[in-house]
Each structure stands twice: as structure tokens, then as C-alpha cells.
Amino acid sequence: AQSVTQLDSQVPVFEEAPVELRCNYSSSVSVYLFWYVQYPNQGLQLLLKYLSGSTLVKGINGFEAEFNKSQTSFHLRKPSVHISDTAEYFCAVSELMGYSTLTFGKGTMLLVSP
Amino acid sequence: DAGVTQSPTHLIKTRGQQVTLRCSPKSGHDTVSWYQQALGQGPQFIFQYYEEEERQRGNFPDRFSGHQFPNYSSELNVNALLLGDSALYLCASSLQGSGANVLTFGAGSRLTVL
């Protein structure tokens, strides 16, 4: 079984400031790693994914994440946030050999203010 | 290209009633998964359907059941509703064998149980 811990339930930042949303996972098997974003009253949209290869992954809307196997982390970063980035962000994992079942963290609310 | 569509978007039921939620997968996808997202929580896996059979199930009681039709669309049924069943129910689709375990989510059906 896997588990995902998102260390911050809420992260307030000012517009144009950098941000990091933290994610740690636990698993007895190899996993794929994902970040999803959920805007108010909407479903989940895939931001980026780590499957294999380079540990630095770039996604949509200027976001990137770095996979650190030794620390079992997959933190999400953006060098300069916009008001429109205000949303809930979810980190998730799935087993390499599984049926694409995702295990999610509890989410981090990113609040961007002017 | 239509993504994942879910209906209804909102519904209100009373305790003890039964509810059916519907999902049409993204064009070209053949696998449907259902997730429950309680307020302030990350989505939790309910079950997955492939080739009209339940292939994997999360930690949910038998009150939760589903079906997949030959056109790959799916239904989620919940019997004997409890107050705790109030949540956003998300449908996600994927293509078996495509690797990457990438899911496409719908906007969800928000169920309120009174």
C-alpha cells in the first residue's frame, strides 16, 4: 500500500513570489508520481507526472517538480505565481505494475494575493 | 474532443435513499475509475471498471456498486445513503495498456445527503 503526505494544508503567497508545495510518499513498490490541480467547483487537471528518467519534471502553467528517491519526496515549485494559480493542489502516486489506481494526499490550498 | 462527462452535476438526497451517478469516458478510453472526495480531503479510490467488470476496489462497503456498459460508460450506485456519503464523486477514464497510468477526470457530481 502507498500513502502520500502533503505537509502544508494551506500556503499563502504574494503574486510574483516563488512557491514550493511539499509532498512526501511512502510505498513498498516503485511508483509513478503526479501533481493535480483543482480549481473551485471543477474536477482535477493533471499538472505534471514523473514516470522515469530525469528527476526534474516540467508541467503546464510554469510548474515543475523534482523527484527525490532517497527522501521519497516530489515537491512542486513555481518561480513566480499569478493570482490565477489560486487553487487546491494534490500530490498522488500509483504503482508501476498496478491498474492506474491513484492514492492522493489531502491537498494543499495555494492562496495567491496581490 | 469531449473529455470525461458526468451527470448530474449536483443532487440532494435523504438518508436511506439510493442514488445513481453516470459517467462517459473520454473518447478512446476504455477504463473507468470512481473516486469519492469528501470536503477538505483528497479523492479516495472507490473502484475501477474494465471490460464491463469491476477490476479493483478500494475500501468502500458493498452499498457502493457500479456498472460499465459496452460503450465504456459507467454508473456508480450507492444504496442506503448515509450523511457521510455527502461528497464530490469524481469519474476518471484511461486507456488500458497505454502505460503512464494517466487518468483524465470529469468535473464531478456533488451529492448532498440530508
Image (cartoon, coloured by chain):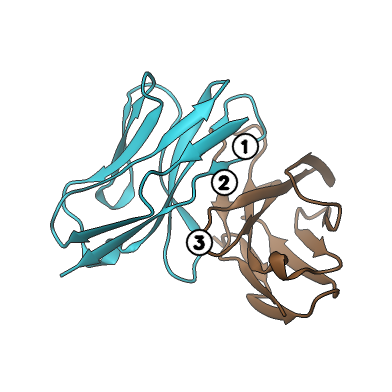
Residue matched to label 2: B103
Q: Residues within 10 Å of mark 1 (few under 14, many from 20)?
A: many
- Residue type at the position of mark 2: Leu
Q: Residue at x 64, y 41 (%)?
A: B95
Q: Secondary structure at mark 2?
A: loop
When asked about the image quadrant of residue B2, the answer is bottom right
Residue matched to label 1: A100
Image x and y of residue A34, in percent: 45, 40
Image x and y of residue A58, in percent: 30, 38
Q: Secondary structure at mark 3?
A: loop
Task: From this view, report whether residue A114 is shown above or below residue A55.
Answer: below
Chain of the residue under the numbered disc 1 shown in the image: A
Residue contact at pointers 2 and 1, CB within 8 angstroms = yes
The residue mark sitting in front, 3 or 2, is 3
What colour denotes chain B?
Answer: brown
Q: What chain is colored cyan?
A: A
How far is disc 3 from disc 2 in space, using C-alphas?
21 Å
Residue matched to label 3: B40
**Residue B106 visible in the shown view:** yes
Q: Is residue B46 left or right of residue B81?
A: left
- Residue type at the position of mark 3: Gly
Q: Is residue A106 left or right of residue A59?
A: right
The reply to the same-chain question for discs 1 and 3 is no
**Residue B99 visible in the shown view:** no
The reply to the same-chain question for discs 3 and 2 is yes
Image x and y of residue A10, in percent: 34, 57
- Residue type at the position of mark 1: Ser
Precedes in sequence: disc 3 or disc 2? 3
